[in-house]
Image (cartoon, rainbow, N blue to C red):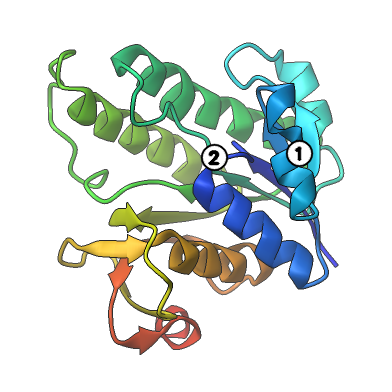
Amino acid sequence: MMHVVIAGGHGQVALLLGELLVERGHRVTGLIRSQDQTADLERVGVEAMLVDLESVSPADLAGAIEGADGVVFAAGGGPGSGAARKETVDYEAAIALVNACGTAGVDRYVMISAMGAANPPDHADPDDVYAVYLRAKAGADDALMTSGLDWTVVRPGRLTNEPGTGKITLGPSVEGGDIPRSDVAEVLVVCVTERSTVGEVFEVVSGDVPILEAIAAL
């Protein structure tokens, strides 16, 4: 059994991931920023811990993940947030979690990134929130990949709430497309519980190859 900590534990993908991990016998802690989110985590068997990633001290964040076997960064400013929260959550909080892993001795870190982060705009217009978001994701990915941790960076396409198919297209660079959140969660389960994707960064959309087969082909 692993103990996995999910930063941004109330997100849609995070809740699906937490539920899958619990179903498979793992202990899961979700870091949340509002006590009102506790019930949703507990409903799927995930332990809730109140940690505001934008204001928590480095020592307290390290304490929150101490003893974990791995972390998943699933936090984000959210679709309705402005450019400032892309910086404070998608970039700064992701790096804070990298540093916390170093302090707490947690070596496994899985990052939920985004397609387009491999080649973000050179200069993001502050009014172009999506461009700021991609640059924030790219910066966080780069920091993780040079951290010395055992990392995996997953860059999904456009997320949907369609039923999962269990089949994907995966690679360092793939044609843009959609992918159900439930399929992303299944991919993340494999990434965080197995060592085969350590040091891999890949894009993933819906496709024709079963998830386990596609990941094995990496």
Q: Give how far across and how far down residue 208 sits, in percent.
A: 29, 86
Real-space CA distance between mark 2 and mark 1, rounded to the nearest whole angstrom: 34 Å
Residue ID for mark 2: 147
Taking depth in this image into account, of 29 and 110 the one nearest to the observer is 29
Front of the two marks 2 and 1: 1
25 left or right of 14? right
- Image-based side of 86 in relation to 49, left or right: left
Q: Which image quarter is the C terminus in?
A: bottom left
User: What residue is drawn where x is 58% and y is 49%?
Assistant: 14
Q: Image point 63% across, 11% down: which residue? A: 55
**Residue at the image position 52 percent from the left and 31 percent from the top:** 94
Viewport quadrant of the N terminus: bottom right
The quarter of the displayed image where residue 58 is located: top right
- Mark 2 packing: few (<14 Cα in 10 Å), some, or many (20+)? some
Name the amino acid, label 1.
Ala
Residue 100, image quadrant: top right
Q: Going from the N terminus, do you reach mark 2 or mark 1 first?
A: 1
User: In this figure, which residue is indicated by the disc labeled 1?
Assistant: 39
**Label 1: few (<14), some (14–19) or many (≥20) C-alpha neighbours in 10 Å:** some
